[in-house]
Image (cartoon, rainbow, N blue to C red):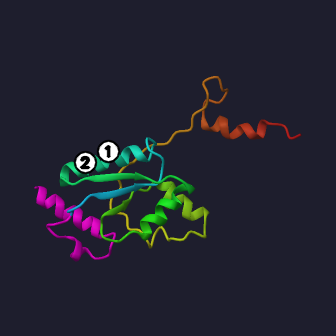
Amino acid sequence: MRRGTIGAIAVLFAALTGDAHAQATDSYPDRPIKVVVPAAAGGVTDTPARILTNRMRDNLGQTFVVENQGGAGGILASENVKRASPDGYTLLYVNAATHGLLPALKKSLSYDALKDFVPIVMAVRAPLAIVVRSESPYRTLADLVKAPAAIPNP
């Protein structure tokens, strides 16, 4: 089973290079794999990345090194991984903001989130919530949406 897992993951990682045949070998991985997280350690992006890399380590018997590269909304980390050798040993753990929202808002990126990177797995589905302080008069989203209209213009 381990050999099958290694082969399957090697093929997935090879998708990053565009050369699946060259990467899907019995020797992969034969050295530590770096997973770049475009956020600070301990945050909402970092935590699931570490859980995932621990599982991959257990399945492959190989070391995974999580490297946090926070800053510029994920641009710095994305640029660094784009410049890395496309050999499957440097992976980028992204979220909807870094590779969905940011490219839509910033047209002058040095990379194309769709052409320069290939998604290999959806790792996490996480709900988001809008909350207010318990003392707030707002109890529903409709209450909150109506609020600006109730504020008189000076």
Residue depicted at x 20% and y 70%: 24
Q: Quadrant of the C terminus?
A: top right
Q: Which residue is mark 1?
A: 51
Percent of width and height locating residue 27: 16, 66
Q: Is residue 81 left or right of residue 135?
A: left
Residue depicted at x 35% and y 63%: 90
Percent of width and height locating residue 18: 32, 75
Q: Main secondary structure of the magenta part?
A: helix
Residue 102 placement: quadrant:
bottom right
Q: Is residue 49 left or right of residue 139?
A: left
The residue under label 2 is which amino acid type? Arg
Percent of width and height locating residue 153: 86, 41
Q: Which residue is mark 2?
A: 55
Magenta stretch bounds:
1-28
Q: Is residue 61 left or right of residue 70?
A: left
View extreme (right): residue: 154
- Indicate the secondary structure of the residue bearing disc 1: helix
Percent of width and height locating residue 20: 25, 74
